[in-house]
Amino acid sequence: MKLSTLAACVLASAVALEAQSTSTALFRVLACPSHENPPIVGSQSSGEVLIEMRLDRDAAGNLT
């Protein structure tokens, strides 16, 4: 009895996991003084950042 209950739970979990999806979105941002508002004059600095977002969706395609 316990084994069949466990098997049913595992099967239900597997079906639920299959209905969900995960994707990754990457955003690359370049920062420099001229991109500011108002622009910063007299600075030669710059920077770069890479943002990675993990997007989990349910079976209906809604973000979770």
Image (tube, rainbow, N blue to C red):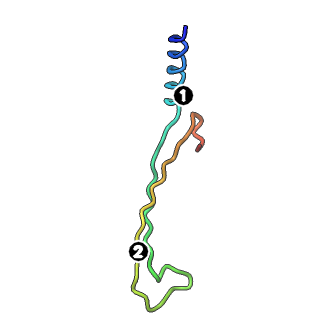
Which residue appears at 45% of the width and 60% of the height? 51
Depicted 13 relative to depicted 41: above or below = above
Callout 2 crowding tier (Cα within 10 Å): few <14, some 14–19, many ≥20:
few
Q: Could you tell me which secondary element the residue under label 2 belongs to?
A: strand
Q: Residue 46 falls in which quadrant of the image?
A: bottom left
* Residue type beneath disc 2: Gly
Residue reaching furthest bottom? Answer: 42
Depicted 60 relative to depicted 45: above or below = above
Which residue appears at 55% of the width and 40% of the height? 57
Task: Please name the residue that numbered disc 1 is placed on.
Answer: 16
Which residue appears at 48% of the width and 53% of the height? 53
Which residue appears at 46% of the width and 82% of the height? 33
Task: Please name the residue that numbered disc 2 is placed on.
Answer: 47
Q: Is residue 4 left or right of residue 43?
A: right
Depicted 39 relative to depicted 52: above or below = below
Callout 1 crowding tier (Cα within 10 Å): few <14, some 14–19, many ≥20:
few
Kindly report the distance in space between the C-alpha atoms of the residues bearing marks 2 and 1. Answer: 42 Å
Residue 7: x percent and y percent?
A: 50, 15
Quadrant including the N terminus:
top right
Residue 14: x percent and y percent?
A: 49, 25
Q: Is residue 46 left or right of residue 3?
A: left
Q: Is residue 55 left or right of residue 44?
A: right
The circle on residue 51 is: none
Q: Residue 64 falls in which quadrant of the image?
A: top right
